[in-house]
Amino acid sequence: MKKQYYKAYVSGALTGLSKDSNMKEFYEKVAEIVDSVLGFGTAYVPHKHTDPVKDPDVTPEEVYRVDKERVCESNLVIAYVGIPSLGVGAELEMANSQNIPILLLCRKGEKVSRLPRGMESVKGLFEYTSEEEALNWIENKLKELLLTK
């Protein structure tokens, strides 16, 4: 079987995260799982490039351009949707309009808007109770994706 090259975009709220939030670390763990299953360098994590705290001089237009380019060149978007975020919503619609498969994640009990859950490109929503459980689900979904290509 010919190995297909994958690119995955890891989406999650950035603006407004509290200083003690560990969400960025969680996004990085998701990227590590993606890289371990699909190959090193396949995961793009926005805050590593245009973080609103570490990179405040990047213009909104540049953030939009870069994120849109990265989403649209991806084969998969993995999005944490447990924290409402306009940016995540925009990224999801970019992927949905290009028929790019989307995996959604949130903690059990978090309310997630019906709009992203109803997008045609969404291939699953996983409500997890532990990070380990979420990362295992992602790993299994990625392996399923590889088997179906």
Image (spheres, helix red, strand yellow):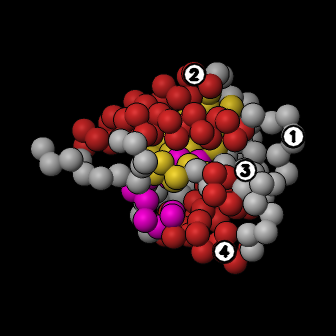
Range of residues picked out in magenta = 70-79
Task: Give the structural element (helix, strand or loop) at label 4.
Answer: helix
The residue positioned 72% from the left and 56% from the top of the image is 51
Looking at the image, tell me whether mark 4 or mark 2 is earlier in sequence order.
4
Image quadrant in which you'd find residue 139? top left
Q: Which residue is mark 3?
A: 13
Q: Are marks 4 and 2 in contact (CB under 8 Å)?
A: no
Task: Give the structural element (helix, strand or loop) at label 1.
Answer: loop
**Which percent across, then down, holds residue 89?**
66, 60
Q: In this orientation, does residue 114 appear?
A: no
Q: Nearer the viewer, mark 4 or mark 2?
A: 4
The residue positioned 40% from the left and 30% from the top of the image is 140
**Which percent across, then down, holds residue 100?**
43, 60
Q: Is residue 90 above or below residue 22?
A: below
Q: Residues within 10 Å of mark 4 (few under 14, many from 20)?
A: few
Q: Is residue 95 above or below residue 20?
A: below
In the rendered structure, find residue 132 and report the number of the disc placed on it: 2
In the rendered structure, find residue 121 and report the number of the disc placed on it: none
Image quadrant in which you'd find residue 91? bottom right
Measured Cα–Cα span from mark 4 to mark 2? 34 Å
Left or right of 18, for residue 24: left
Measured Cα–Cα span from mark 1 to mark 4? 24 Å
Q: Which residue is mark 1?
A: 19
Measured Cα–Cα span from mark 3 to mark 2? 20 Å
**Which percent across, then down, holds residue 111?**
74, 41
Measured Cα–Cα span from mark 1 to mark 2? 23 Å
Magenta-drawn stretch contains 10: no
Q: Is residue 99 above or below residue 123?
A: below
